[in-house]
Amino acid sequence: MATVRSVLRFQSLTNAIYVNKRLLCLCVINNKSSVRNLHTHRKPAFLQHNHYGPLLLQVSQFHRSSSLTKNYYEKLSVAKNASQKEIKKAYYQMAKKYHPDVNKNDPSAEKKFSEASEAYEVLGDEEKRQQYDNLGSYSQQAAAGAEGPFHGASYQYHRTVDPEELFRKIFGDFRANMDQGGDFAESHFGYKASDEITVHLSFKESARGLNKDIHLNVVAVCPKCDGTRCMLGTKAIRCHYCNGTGTETISTGPFVMRQTCRYCGGTRMIIPNPCDECVGKGQTVQRKTVSVQIPAGITDGQTLRMTVTGKEVFVHVKVKDNPYFRRDGSDVHTDASISLSQAVLGGTTRIQGVY
């Protein structure tokens, strides 16, 4: 076990725990004189009255640095009282803007994408957000020189999810969205097209089968600009950065290379007045009603696969319990009460049918 002699000479903030039979406390030593006192076996004033020999255990330092005083709200450009929906939307905008796949020539984009992911990982979880609000605010006060009950303590967060994986988990695969027609603008219906949906059926509906109308999100041509990406009465013009070639030439010393134009993205055209509905994307997320053919005899938990506007959608079926009918494989069972005379002499009784 460590003794007082094992205390290191910390250059700045030092922390130690004194443990004895009656007392467990955290001693935060803020100056070098206190450290010298420890090396001369002098206990802090609040322990002088205790006659038990203290045991000094080293603990990890609370590091105070700019990296620990990150303002996640500023990273996502949201207010501290922002709702989860606002935080999610802000993260989506930042992640799309700085995604490495669309900023291949900007080395700083990957860092900003990672920072936005870290901010959302904390603020998007209510428990982590509350911890950050409690400790993070004290970290910022400490960085500004303010004293407080947690002076010197900082909120530290260690990422557990890869930034790319986090984005894919929430909004789907970015590359797949790009391959299916490029970028698109979100709307009040959501941030992406539906890739799965749950349909609830009654017992009789599952037994009979039917055509069920469902509502889902699809990525479709902007209804306002009809896919032109321009405001009404305006049109796209030839890119003057690449002179309409879609590529640009970059000289780096003796080497000359050609790459896709950074301004028009290789489209050869730029839009000076983008449509305010789709933000110049030409496509938006829209709500669409489609009819799903439910086969007779479908069971609870089964999944149907269908194609909507060229995109595969999985339909998960949930069948509600019925107090009268119960299912056993392909058979439907029910119970009927009969009188004693019917049981002895036989007879008829009326029961409900599935059809």
Image: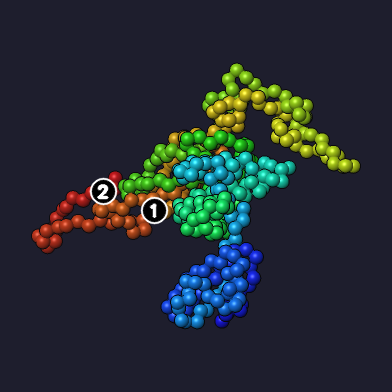
Mark 1 sits on what residue? 300
In front of the other: 39 or 91: 39
Q: Residue at x 40, y 40 (%)?
A: 212
Question: Looking at numbered disc 1 in the image, what kind of residue is underneath it?
Answer: Asp
Foreground tag (2 vs 1): 1
**Horizontal placement of 244 versus 157: left or right?**
right
Q: Which numbered disc covers residue 353?
A: 2
- 62 vs 38: above or below: above
Outermost residue on the top side: it is: 233
10 Å neighbourhood of mark 1: few (<14), some, or many (≥20)? some
In front of the other: 147 or 334: 147
Counting from the top left corner in percent of width and height, residue 291 is at 43, 38
Find residue 9 and report its image quarter.
bottom right
Q: Residue at x 25, y 53 (%)?
A: 324
10 Å neighbourhood of mark 2: few (<14), some, or many (≥20)? few
Q: Which numbered disc covers residue 7?
A: none
Find residue 33 and report its image quarter.
bottom right
Is residue 167 something that shows in the picture?
Answer: no
- 159 vs 293: above or below: below
Q: Residue at x 41, y 49 (%)?
A: 317
Counting from the top left corner in percent of width and height, residue 206 is at 36, 48
In front of the other: 285 or 57: 57
Counting from the top left corner in percent of width and height, residue 157 is at 56, 57
Question: Looking at numbered disc 2 in the image, what kind of residue is underneath it?
Answer: Gly
For marks 2 and 1 on the same chain, the one whose residue lies earlier in the sequence: 1
Counting from the top left corner in percent of width and height, residue 314 is at 49, 47
Q: Residue at x 21, y 51 (%)?
A: 351
- 222 vs 10: above or below: above
